[in-house]
Image (cartoon, grey):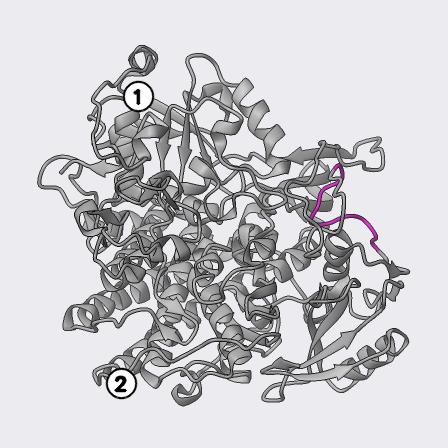
Amino acid sequence: MIAAAQTRTLAPEALDAAAAELLESGGRMQMAWALVPPGTRHPELCYLAAPGPRRPFVVWRLSPQGAEVPSLARRTPLLSWYEREITDLFSVRFTDHPEPAPLVLHAGADPPCPVLDPHCRAEAVPFAQVPPKFPAVSGDVQLLPFGPVRADVVESARFFFFYIGEHILHYQPQLFFKHRGMEQTFQGRDPGPAVVLAERVSGVGSCAHALAYCQAVEAAAGSEVPLRARRLRVLLAELERLYNHLHYFGQLADTTTLKVGQAQGRLLEEQAKQINARLTGSRLLRGLLVPGGLRRDLAIDRALVRELGVLRGETVGYVRMLEQTTSYRDRLHDTGVLDAATAFDQGATGPVERASGLDRDLRRDHPYAAYEDNGLRVPMERAGDAYARARVRAREIDVSFDLILRLLPQLAAEGPIRGDCRPAPGAEGLGWTESPRGSLYYAVHCDDEGRLARVKIKSPSYSNWRVFPYTVHESNMMDYAINEASFGLTIAGCDR
Amino acid sequence: MVMWSWFGLHRGKATTGWPRPGGDDGQAGVLGMPRFDPQCCRTGCRECIAVCPSAALRPAPPGSEPPLRIDYGRCLGCQLCVEACPEGALSPSGDWAFGVTRREDLQWQRAVESSAGQALGQRVAALRRSLHIRHLDAGSCNGCESELQALSNPFYNLHRLGIFFTASPRFADLLLVTGPVTAPMREPLRTTYQAMPEPRLVMASGTCAVSGGAVAGSYNSGCGVDQWLPVDLYLPGCPPNPAALIEGLLVLLERIPQRVKGGRLER
């Protein structure tokens, strides 16, 4: 029984009908994961279904007992990657999968046993690099492999471009070079201190990850978080959104070759990080969240209010100047168009889906922390191009500042910041946040001693990397960097 | 475009004078590695060892004084030990500038022997005042990249120190590696290093690159860069902030002296 969600037990043969029914009624699948429950030998599957806004999540549970499971990837394509990952890590087979290639473990990895099965004691997976195989190209078509070590200070991934001249015919990213096995590092740990690991899944999403993890553990333990801690959590989560969105605009200005615009975006991001450090001791907002509340209280002083006010003024002016720059707008309009149907089917999330007309935001639709009491506007666009994605983020910066300034007076009153939180043996919980990049889920399963047996992490970039190539096929090389920047992806969060 | 030029001129200089004396390093409030006071560590309670997520704190052999061993090369700066210690032996600090040329210097020691002993000087002499860096992400959480990217922002403006990032390893003097070196990144790490001309230097940047940090020992993670390449500078931190990165680079170039010895920052 996963706390914070309803449970529905399904037989493998009932899976497809259940998915069809969910889609029919306007719902959407969110993720799928596997675990080997304590005391058993065979993996069990869990699917997270979202029937709709303000309606509780439903976890479908399945015990295939080692048999093959019907693939849902044709009915709901966003599940394709989850199924492939389950095959890589648990050796569960899916019948009739449309893309049955390895995903998180690269070709050449040879695990002696399913690596996330607690009975498997493999310390390091033997690995021999195997170059990916592609159909031979001929005529004017050329194949450009790019990465994993790329120009500039960026994360590692390899991209394959099939192109003629400037025209990209097909684009194939190869990710998971950075797959660290983060989910395994949680196993066997005490749920309290393990929050430090959640903070290190995706550095620029430290707070969102820690918050989703804490909320999953709190759901498992059935514990209450004091109001002041919930409000401070909102403050931290919105400060994280601010520096991430500012980074995003610096990046967009860079790819549209606005040198001063790039410098100003980077400078504003630096100012936001320095505010983070003075408030919390960490530029990435680490070291504060813990299951049950916060590790220590924060002093909200006048200086913070003043600094945020200055940052807001400069940010508003900066975004307005970008908007007034025709060369910038020209490069974004009609670049990397993502239509609403593809966004829905392939699982786009966050500002990316909201720019394609899908009106979803976990802060409003499934409120947590103190979002319920702070009425949230959710900016929307419909065009689905890079400009729409930038517009959504620009307006989200405004919403975040509004939210923070409304919150600060509420934080004047002192109060407790930490409650008891200790999950019972065998407890399970689900936690979620709307991170700067979109929906983030943690599922936590405890063992017989209340320690972590399995932690599943669904990061927003895992969803959006799946979607991104659909906007690159049949586009052109000159727009690629702008399009990639407009998605605001991280690789660490995706690869874990 | 005219608008941006005007804005740039009007906005003026944003770059700090640091590391010149009196300059702002930009790290007000940043928490660094916990400081250890052996005088206060009396009962041998091991509370800190129990909470440390990356085995930076380990029990010392029975009868040793103090009863624990500290390896700052594994420290995430998460402050859990500081909160757990009932005796106040571990206290929060702003000690984040932890770049060292020898791995042993990150281990806490009661007595510090002062021999510098490395042939680094001869190799950096050839580079002296200018340095070109090829960054390589070998499985970081992207926290390190976030701070490395900050080096190029107008506040730190790394170029003013004669230090540049370069796209090609052929032009690079230094390979700056982040992340624990995951299995699929081993080969790219090796080929990138091989593509660099001599003299070439390697910097393990961030606790993951120094020791594997919190993810050491998982099925796909490594235990740091020095498993695979000779390392000239170790800079733990999770992540090292931009000022720590600059200090580390200047220590590597022998433009400033190394301040950390025996796991302690000389102040």
Q: In the shown orientation, is residue B6 left or right of residue A427? A: left
Measure the alpha-carbon separation of dots 2 and 1.
Answer: 51 Å
* Label 1 Cα neighbours within 10 Å, binned few <14 / some 14-19 / many ≥20: some
Q: Which chain carries label 2?
A: A
List the residue tagged with mark 1. Answer: B130
Which residue is at 25% across, 81% downward? Answer: A411
Q: Quadrant of the N terminus of chain A?
A: bottom right
User: Closest to the observer: A197 or B62?
Assistant: B62
Residue type at mark 2 is Gln
As helix, strand or loop, the secondary structure at mark 1 comes to loop
Which residue is at 33% across, 16% downward? Answer: B120
Eyeballing the image, is B11 above or below A205?
A: above
Eyeballing the image, is A239 above or below A258?
A: below
* Label 2 Cα neighbours within 10 Å, binned few <14 / some 14-19 / many ≥20: few
> Is A107 in the magenta?
yes
Q: In the shown orientation, is residue A288 left or right of residue A475? A: left
Residue type at mark 1 is Ser
Residue farthest front in this picture = B63
Q: Is residue B158 visible?
A: no
Residue A441: x and y, percent?
A: 58, 69
Q: What stretch is highlighted in magenta?
A: A99-108
Which residue is at 34% across, 29% downward? Answer: B104
List the residue tagged with mark 2. Answer: A410
Q: In the shown orientation, is residue B203 left or right of residue B64? A: right
User: Closest to the observer: A373 or B240?
Assistant: B240
Residue A215: x and y, percent?
A: 49, 75
